Image (spheres, grey):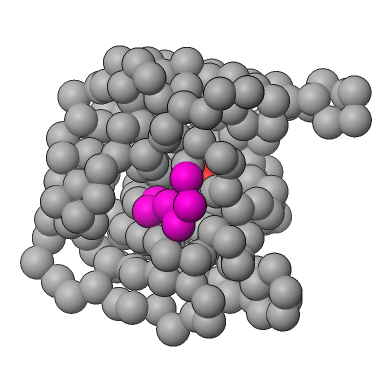
Amino acid sequence: MFDELPIQMSLPDATVTYYPQWLTANQASRYQAILQEELLWSQDYIKIYGRTVKIPRLQAWYGEPEALYTYSKLEMKPLAWHPVLADLRAELEEECAAQFNSVLANWYRHGQDSMGMHSDDEPELGVRPVIASLTLGQARGFIMKHKITGQKEVLDLAHGSLLVMSGDTQANWQHGINKTKKTVADRINLTFRHITPVRP
Ligand SMILES: O=C(O)CCC(=O)C(=O)O
Ligand SMILES: [Mn+2]
């Protein structure tokens, strides 16, 4: 969106492109304020070994009606596009030359909010998915770990930055956001995806 050259990350067995300032700081702050206020954020729970556990962040799932998404056995029905998300989707489809029919919004409220290491490799994302990840708010370390070699990289995803993961990235790497004892402000992350419903 903003006129700048993307950085091709040199990670083995992955295709990762980083746009440090895809949105200007002003645009990013405006979107962050609107989305924090207007998205239908929910505190979801997952079951781990029979125990019900609070997910350590707020989340919201928006998209086309067919974009049903199952995450840790939690089935999420998409909410109808918020106008800001719809605009961002259109821009990102152009930027990435890909189609996105849904977006997972995560709100990390403070340093105790986090996301465990995982790959975005659910069957409904298909093979070699393109995931466009937009960060609004406080930068947090985005940890990437190679599944075989254990190579670890930490990317500080800046306010207004865009990270696009494609090709074999999800097949070969995991990613996540650790908790931190540092005082950190709110961070919203939007991951735009293309979901194709799969039959059980
Ligand atoms: O917050 C982030 O940067 C990561 C989000 C993520 O991995 C996901 O939504 O699957
Ligand atoms: Mn992910």
Q: Position of residue 2 (x, y in %)?
A: 12, 60
Identify the main secondary structure in magenta.
Answer: loop
177 sits to left or right of 103: right
Q: Position of residue 40 (x, y in %)?
A: 42, 16
User: Which part of the image, by quadrant, shows the C terminus?
Assistant: top right
153 sits to left or right of 39: right
Q: Quadrant of residue 7?
A: bottom left
Q: Is residue 40 visible?
A: yes
**Most extreme residue toward the left, as rendered?**
3
Q: Quadrant of residue 110?
A: top right
Q: Is residue 182 visible?
A: no
Residue occupying the point 90% across, 30% down: 49
Q: Which residues are magenta?
A: 126-131
**Most extreme residue toward the front, as rendered?**
199
Residue 171 forms part of the magenta stretch: no
User: Which part of the image, by quadrant, shows the N terminus?
Assistant: bottom left
Residue in the foreground of this view, choosing between 94 and 155: 94
Residue in the foreground of this view, choosing between 126 and 84: 126
Residue occupying the point 90% across, 23% down: 50
User: Compared with residue 95, is residue 19 higher up or lower down, i.e. above or below?
Assistant: below
Give the total of numbered labels.
0
Residue occupying the point 25% across, 43% down: 99
Residue in the foreground of this view, choosing between 200 and 93: 200
Q: Position of residue 67 (x, y in %)?
A: 40, 25
Q: Position of residue 75 (x, y in %)?
A: 59, 20
Residue occupying the point 9% across, 66% down: 3
89 sits to left or right of 51: left
